[in-house]
Amino acid sequence: MYAEERQQAMARAVAARGRMSVAELATEYDVTTETVRRDLSALEVMGLLRRVHGGAVPASALTSLEHGLAVRDTAQVDEKDAIARRALALLPPAGGSIVLDAGSTTVRLAECIPRDRRLIVFTHSVPVAARLVANPAVELHLLPGIVRPTTQAAVGPETVAALAPVRVDVAFLGANGITLEHGFSTPDVNEAATKRAIVAAGRQVVVLADATKIGVEATVQFAGLSAVDVLVTDPGIAGRQRKELVAAGLEVVTP
């Protein structure tokens, strides 16, 4: 097989499978790992795939583009509503405490929180706080920081410092991307730092993310798979993806 033919075959294989490692490609095409890396570099220059740590993903899978909250709120609406309702079962008993991260799905969870269950809630999200401020059962703590217009959430050193002494029963987070190798990720460095602090604050850590986020790698990792206890997603998750995440130790639940 000529190099051009091999490279085209590699690009098709990565597109079909969603992700392939350097070792898998080397075995499949009977070449050295060094040859695979050269081929992947050439294919990336042509825009046919994107190189990631240890392998490659389709060109559409790796993104640093961050949509504003208003845009994200209109995508996968039914799935996000169902995820939020399913996440209600993971709320702690009355008297418990949670952190709610920013995001279009966590906003929906905030809207669903019962008005007769006493909870202590920490959040850095302005939209989440707006939903909870009128809930008579919620003791609301709004975290400080600089509010990003894109996510309408407070971020920065002040936000991270405010979370440092906090310990809650459950931390609920959103994510822009989820993969085996890169874990849970987001495009912005400051958002990632805040999310890491939220993860550290939770006795149990729950990520709410629709299935379109699985197989996507955003720029900055905020948690490895082992740092998260439960992923609540929608039934659109591929069977292979679910098996791989469960095998990695993550509990995956769907509505």
Image (cartoon, rainbow, N blue to C red):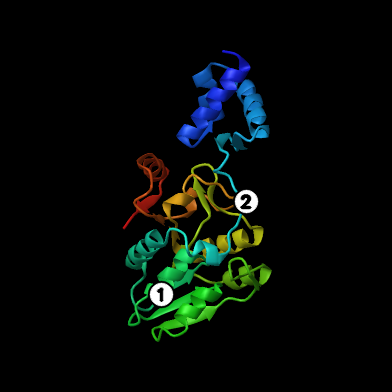
Which residue is rendered at x = 50% and y = 34% of the image? 15
The residue lying at 41 percent from left, 45 percent from top is 245
Which of the two labelled residues, at mark 2 and mark 1, occupies the earlier sequence position? 2
Measuring from the top left, give residue 116's x and y in whole percent: 32, 82
Tell me the kind of residue under disc 2.
Ser
Q: Residues within 10 Å of mark 2 (few under 14, many from 20)?
A: few
Distance from the alpha carbon under mark 2 to that under mark 1: 29 Å
The kind of secondary structure element at disc 2 is: loop
The residue most toward the top is 1
- Report the residue marked by disc 1: 111
Q: Is residue 120 left or right of residue 59?
A: left
Contact, mark 2 vs mark 1 (Cβ under 8 Å): no
Q: Quadrant of the C terminus?
A: bottom left
What percent of the width, then of the height, locates residue 169?
A: 42, 68
Crowding around mark 1 (Cα neighbors within 10 Å: few <14, some 14 to 19, many 20+) is some
Spot occupied by residue 31 in the image (x, y as percentages of width and height): 57, 17
Query: Split into 4 quadrants, where in the image is the N terminus?
Result: top right
Residue in the picture at 61% in, 36% down: 51
Q: Is residue 171 visible?
A: no
Relative horizontal placement of residue 107, taking residue 84 as reference (left or right)? right
The residue closer to the viewer here, 167 or 23, is 23
Please tell me in which quadrant of the rendered image residue 146 appears.
Answer: bottom right
Q: Nearer the viewer, residue 43 or 86?
A: 43
Q: Which residue is more in the foreground, 234 or 220? A: 234
Percent of width and height locating residue 164: 59, 69
Quarter of the rendering containing residue 242: top left
Kindly tell me whether residue 204 is visible in this rendering: yes
Dot label at residue 9? none
**Element class at badge 1:** helix
Q: Which mark is residue 64?
A: 2
> Hey, what amino acid is under mark 1?
Glu
Instruction: Tally the marks.
Output: 2
